[in-house]
Amino acid sequence: MPKRLKREKSTFREYAEAIVIALVLALVIRTFIVQAFKIPSGSMLPTLQIGDHILVNKFIFHFVSPQRGEIIVFKYPKDEKRDFIKRVIGLPGEKLEVRDKQVFINDRPLVESYAVHADPDVQDESFSPRDFLGPFVIPPGEYFMMGDNRDHSMDSRFWGLLDQKKIRGKAFLVYWSWDSEKFRPRLGRMGKIVH
């Protein structure tokens, strides 16, 4: 009888240790390596759809700096409890200007196949910074961020530059997508590489 009790305790202990190890690994992975995020708004349309669930590499920017065109998740500078996702447009040290909806980097127009302008109207710079901004030079350690859905994105044009310390990671994969209007998954988006 004592031998049987000892075996049950060791089996229980094995399961408990396995669960604790799994929880610690999950916490370490989520904190330092990969984290899941959900896309709540249309500011990155058509690249990212409302209801896309993405994986973000939180490890990569410990070794390399963000590059133009990368889609990153960061703490919203006006409320750090919220996460935003936008595309890196301007890098530290670059001169940036938005003129008549066109982005200029160091006085050259930026070619952006991902940018969408749904509103044909151009807003005067006295009314809004959406279509006219700058020119200015981006300081060290800061980035200019924009959504792909340019006419419907709350981005650096409105809240300013992003401090590198607020970056959480680089988006790299859509692992799940849910269409809330049609109440069904978007199977064709699952496994899509984010770029």
Image (cartoon, rainbow, N blue to C red):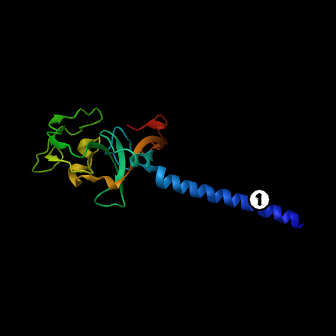
Q: How many marks?
A: 1
Q: Residue at x 31, y 52 (%)?
A: 164
Residue at the image position 34 percent from the left and 55 percent from the top: 166
**In this picture, is 42 found above or below 83?**
above
**Is residue 171 toward the left or the right of residue 12 in the image?**
left
Residue 191, position as x, y percentages in the image: 48, 37
Label 1: state its secondary structure: helix
- Figure quadrant of the N terminus: bottom right
Taking 28 as reference, is 90 above or below it? above
Residue 188 x %, y %:
47, 34
Q: Which residue is mark 1?
A: 11
**Image point (34%, 60%), residue name:** 80
In the picture shown, does residue 74 fall above or below 69?
A: below
Question: Does any portion of residue 39 appear in the rendered image?
Answer: no
Query: For the residue carrying disc 1, how many other residues have a C-alpha within 10 Å: few (<14), some (14-19), or many (20+)?
Result: few
Image-quadrant location for residue 93:
top left
- Side of 19 relative to 154 (left or right): right
Query: Where in the figure is residue 190, as x and y percent of width and height?
Result: 48, 38
Instruction: Specify whether residue 7 is in view.
Output: yes
Q: Residue furthest bottom?
A: 2
Q: Amino acid at mark 1?
A: Thr
Q: Nearer the viewer, residue 7 or 48?
A: 7
The residue furthest front is: 63
Percent position (x, y) of residue 96? 18, 43
Of the 4 image quadrants, the one containing the C terminus is top left
Whether residue 189 sits left or right of residue 107 in the image: it is right
**Residue at the spot 20% in from the left edge and 48% down from the top edge:** 138
